[in-house]
Amino acid sequence: MSRYAHMAFSFSFFFIIFISFIIPLAFSQLPPQNQIDIIKTISKNISSSSWKTANQNPCFWEGVTCTGNSITGISLSKLGISSTGILTDLCKIDSLQSVDVSNNQISGNPDGFLNDCGKLTGLKVLNISMNRLTGPLPTFSGFPVLESLDLSYNSLSGVIDFQLDGLVSLKNLDLSKNSFGGSVPTRLGKNPGLQKLQLSNNKFSGPFPEKLLNYPNLTLLDLSVNKLSGSIPTTLGNFTNLQTLILSSNNLDGEIPQSLSRMTNLSRFSANLNRFNGAIPPGLTQYLNILDLSYNSLAGLIPVDLLSPPNLQSVDLMKNLLEGEIPTNISSNLLRLRLSENSLNGSIPSSIGKLQGLTYLELEGNKLTGSIPLELENCVKLTLLNLASNWLQGPLPKGLGKLLQLVVLKLSGNQFTGEIPPEISQFTNLSTIDLSRNFLTGNIPSGITSLGWLSILNLGCNNLNGSIPASISGSFSLLEIQLGRNMLGGDIPRMPSSLQIALNLSNNHFSGPIPSTLSSLTSLEVLDLSNNQFTGEVPTFLVQLGSLNRLLLSNNNLSGTLPRFHTWTTVESDGNSDLKAPTPNPSPSPTIVSRIPSPRWKINPIILVAIAAVVGVAIHTVVVAAIVLKVSRRPYRVDKNRGSEENLHQLNDGHLSTADRIHRSNINFRKAIKSVYDPLMF
Ligand SMILES: *[C@@H]1O[C@H](CO)[C@@H](O)[C@H](O)[C@H]1NC(C)=O
Ligand SMILES: *[C@@H]1O[C@H](CO)[C@@H](O)[C@H](O)[C@H]1NC(C)=O
Ligand SMILES: *[C@@H]1O[C@H](CO)[C@@H](O)[C@H](O)[C@H]1NC(C)=O
Ligand SMILES: *[C@@H]1O[C@H](CO)[C@@H](O)[C@H](O)[C@H]1NC(C)=O
Ligand SMILES: *[C@@H]1O[C@H](CO)[C@@H](O)[C@H](O)[C@H]1NC(C)=O
Ligand SMILES: *[C@@H]1O[C@H](CO)[C@@H](O)[C@H](O)[C@H]1NC(C)=O
Ligand SMILES: *[C@@H]1O[C@H](CO)[C@@H](O)[C@H](O)[C@H]1NC(C)=O
Ligand SMILES: *[C@@H]1O[C@H](CO)[C@@H](O)[C@H](O)[C@H]1NC(C)=O
Ligand SMILES: *[C@@H]1O[C@H](CO)[C@@H](O)[C@H](O)[C@H]1NC(C)=O
Ligand SMILES: *[C@@H]1O[C@H](CO)[C@@H](O)[C@H](O)[C@H]1NC(C)=O
Ligand SMILES: *[C@@H]1O[C@H](CO)[C@@H](O)[C@H](O)[C@H]1NC(C)=O
């Protein structure tokens, strides 16, 4: 009995499987002939290979969705389509529910071709983002069930008034990254159930649009990168369904309203790059995951409860006027804490050691005192530790060696004493180490040279003595070595030929002739040997270093005649009493002219700056930008905007990325950043 039951069960089981796999293939019917005709006409203009196949049934073509025997969805994203006619044609397929022609080159004003799509009674999704649409927003008529309209990343302009009135089902509207102006539109279709509204990167001005309360079901509101002014009304708290509120990069001022703390569903609040002032209200982070109030004028103390809620993952209060101490009750789930450039005092709370997931800790530019808490060694996920420019003192704890994931370590501009712990060689992923401007003593630990990703080594302005470890010659990831203003001496080892940004040995006790091994530094832009006791002649191989921008030889004991350098090399040679200026050259040698477009431009600073600016200059990539600026002394002052670049990028992409194409050492960091920020993305 049970055996038969079993067999019967097996049979019916396989039968069902069989049916469910085979039937759709065997019996799926072709769409109606008129739909086939339309889509075949279109296919002639589409470069997608699957649209060129012999399969008679378009339902099998890539990007085509069928329900029953009707075509209901078409996605033609990123196929280089430039014909405006395509939408007119597509919208003849009367069963369509979803049309995606994003990321193409469709140009012109959509007024004409949209009308045809309005007749579709089932169209729910229309995505024309990332094209080249221009002119004003067309007036939508028809579209009885359109729920999602994405026109972002085009060049549409003008004011938005009544154009969307005809849309009665709209739930999701994205007009970001266009050139719309006037006040923020509040007539967004007749559906009070609108859920997502993205208007960032336009030229909207005027006050925060209180009338949006007519859409009480909004869950996402992004008004970033516009020109909104005035203060946020307290009625903001009435948007009880909001989950994401992004007001970054406007001219908003006034206080952050207390009513925000009533918004139980709000998980991300970003209002960075505005002019908010006053104190941060208590309870603000009660329900938040992400808070970004950086680059404002917020003052007073950080509320004691601000960092404590267990749901909190990322807090950024950089560049405000906050004072007092860092609250000690800190959520153990925090991944990122950035309090840089305020006036915080007191010591770094030891409770920070409970934050097992902490990946970014940036406290630069405050008035923090005391020593680095030993508990920090428990934050083993740290990839970025920046405590620079504070009043911290004491030794560098050996336990820091446990922070194996560190990519950037910046402790410069403090009062740290003692030796550099040899444990530093355990940071296998370290790309930037900046311990400059402290009171560190002893030798440079040779382990530092075994860090395979290290590109920036800055130990300048300390009291380090002994000689430079010979093994540095094998550190081919190094781009910059700053050892100026120490008490280093002895033989200068061969330097890695990877050096580009600078080699700074100034203000030390180096003596003897300028070493001939420097001749291999063909990519080097700045060489500072000033304020040592170098003797002998200035070697002519220095002239051959085709990338050299600045050569500093001042205050040594060099003698002979200074060779003639290329016009692009600035040479400082004063304070060498026996050194004679080069004999004036009557006519410029043609070889100099022919060399101008050569190695000096191997890394073109303009391109570098551009890439750095575009890619978004995350925290430590600032290094790259700063370097380029410092080195090339060109008028591209990216660093002034660096905060905004960084923050804009952050709010656009939800995570930080770095200019990984510039230097390989950044690739690791990018991954690390991604892993932290991906879970925070929306
Ligand atoms: C196909 O492209 C040609 C030229 O690029 C254009 O004239 C024609 O209107 C297009 N047809 C469709 C259906 O888009
Ligand atoms: C529209 O298409 C773009 C690019 O393919 C995509 O990123 C975006 O999420 C789409 N919009 C909607 C609302 O799905
Ligand atoms: C808002 O959403 C709720 C729950 O999804 C729904 O019941 C309500 O009808 C919506 N309100 C409006 C105005 O659409
Ligand atoms: C906002 O909510 C409060 C109470 O929750 C209510 O009294 C007030 O009328 C609401 N304001 C608006 C503009 O909806
Ligand atoms: C928060 O969102 C949930 C659904 O995600 C909803 O049920 C609830 O009503 C919202 N809370 C408030 C206060 O609106
Ligand atoms: C720290 O904050 C949490 C969550 O806000 C709270 O439950 C806890 O009581 C606070 N601890 C102390 C010592 O204040
Ligand atoms: C820290 O700053 C606060 C506010 O500016 C001040 O009242 C307090 O005395 C300072 N504490 C120390 C230890 O300097
Ligand atoms: C270094 O980074 C890589 C990827 O970025 C990661 O897989 C690896 O675990 C890191 N090494 C250490 C010691 O953390
Ligand atoms: C370096 O300085 C330390 C004291 O800080 C001293 O003990 C040591 O002898 C010095 N080494 C050299 C090589 O000068
Ligand atoms: C070299 O390092 C010293 C000490 O940090 C610094 O003062 C000097 O400006 C640096 N030289 C160059 C060219 O940057
Ligand atoms: C370097 O020159 C100065 C004077 O210019 C002199 O006093 C000093 O002895 C010289 N040092 C060496 C090592 O030649």
Image: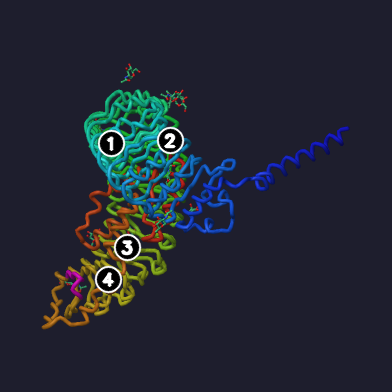
Q: Quadrant of residue 566?
A: bottom left
- Amino acid type at circle 4 is Arg
In the image, is residue 142 above or below residue 264?
below
The image quadrant where one finds the N terminus is: top right
| Label 4 close to label 3 by CB (< 8 Å) | no
Q: Nearer the viewer, residue 518 or 251?
A: 251
- Amino acid type at circle 2 is Leu
* Image side of residue 387 versus residue 99, left or right: left
Q: Which residue is mark 2?
A: 146
**Gap in angstroms between the C-alphas marked 4 and 3:** 19 Å
At x 37%, y 49%, the residue is: 130
Q: Nearer the viewer, mark 4 or mark 3?
A: 4
Q: Which residue is mark 1?
A: 160
Residue 118 visible here? yes
Task: Identify the secondary structure beneath mark 4.
Answer: helix
The image quadrant where one finds the C terminus is: top left
Asked whether residue 424 is drawn in magenta, I would say no
- Amino acid type at circle 3 is Ile
Q: Residues within 10 Å of mark 1 (few under 14, many from 20)?
A: many
In the image, is residue 407 above or below residue 278?
below
**Gap in angstroms between the C-alphas marked 1 and 4:** 51 Å
Residue 410 visible here? no
Picture quarter with ligand 5: top left
Q: Which residue is mark 4?
A: 600
Magenta highlight range? 566-572
Q: Nearer the viewer, residue 68 or 505?
A: 68
State the mark number for residue 481. Answer: 3
* Image side of residue 227 versus residue 441, left or right: left
